[in-house]
Image (cartoon, rainbow, N blue to C red):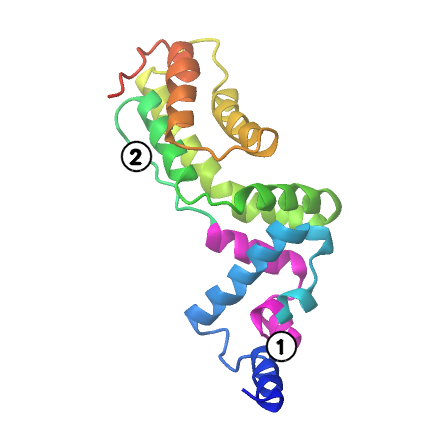
Amino acid sequence: MSSGDAASALRETRRPRKVPLSNPDRRREVLDAVLELLAEVGYERLTMDMVAQRARASKATLYQRWPSKARLAVAALEQHRPHVIDQDTGCLVEDLRHLLVSWLAGWTHLDRGLAIALMEGSRTDAELARLRRERLRRPLRQAARTMLARARQRGQIPDGVDADLLLEMPLSVVLMQVLIEGEQPDRALVDHIVDRALAPLLGTPPHEHDE
């Protein structure tokens, strides 16, 4: 390849792609670029220019679809977020196990950086903090509260047990493993939390797992 051909090819790779963001695949491509950048540089350093370059998109087009950096970041995180499943097994301990497994099902190597970026940005960007509460936390919390309401009706939450703390405890342990220990959460961690902390607290025998 001649130097002229190489320069032409380089210009082509840098030129914005003329595929509209109404196209689901193109929108996913742009939001995947946002996720990569959030995990790499954090929320504070993320700019629309960076996204435009990484995704080969026009900055004006990005702003037309997402008027602020916070909205763009949350759209990317929503796409990345796993679908939380509220499964009614008839037992609160097993319901919690299924909820945690479905929450962690879509976690990837990016998630530690994404969690740090989200916490960092929420501290200084009020819009991001609001959108995080409204659009990222709410689905998990709603599923959990539905689950806890069923358990109360069945008498599965002992007197003196704070149901909100019952939910916060496993989520906090998972985040500590990710943020402090730098470990990828897995099914073994879920089973350990459920069988060695939640089940005894609720007076439920721990589940026996096959070796």
Label of residue 192 in the image: none
Residue 118: x %, y % from top left? 63, 45
What SS does tag 1 mark?
Answer: loop
The answer to whether residue 94 is above or below residue 2 is above
Q: Which quadrant: the C terminus?
A: top left
Asked where in the image residue 119 lies, by quadrant, the reply is top right
Question: From what the image shows, is residue 66 above or below residue 197?
Answer: below
Secondary structure of the residue carrying numbered label 2:
loop
Residue at 41% across, 32% down: 186
Residue for badge 1: 58
Question: Residue 87 got which mark?
Answer: 2
Residue type beneath disc 2: Gln
Q: Earlier in the sequence, mark 2 or mark 1?
A: 1
Q: Is residue 172 magenta?
A: no
Residue at 61%, 71% in the rendered image = 62
Split into 4 quadrants, where in the image is the N terminus? bottom right
Q: Residue at x 35, y 40 (%)?
A: 85
Question: Can you give x and y, in whole percent of width and height, for residue 29 in the image?
Answer: 49, 66
Q: Please tell me whether mark 2 or mark 1 is closer to you in this view.
A: 1
Q: Amino acid at mark 1?
A: Ser
Query: Is residue 157 in sight in this rendering?
Result: no
Range of residues picked out in magenta = 54-80
Residue 78 belongs to the span the image colors magenta:
yes
Q: CA distance from mark 2 to mark 1?
A: 43 Å
Q: Quick check: marks 2 and 1 in contact, CB under 8 Å?
A: no
Residue 127 coordinates in the image, percent (x, y): 68, 52
Magenta span dominant secondary structure: helix
Query: In the image, 179: left or right of 149?
Result: right
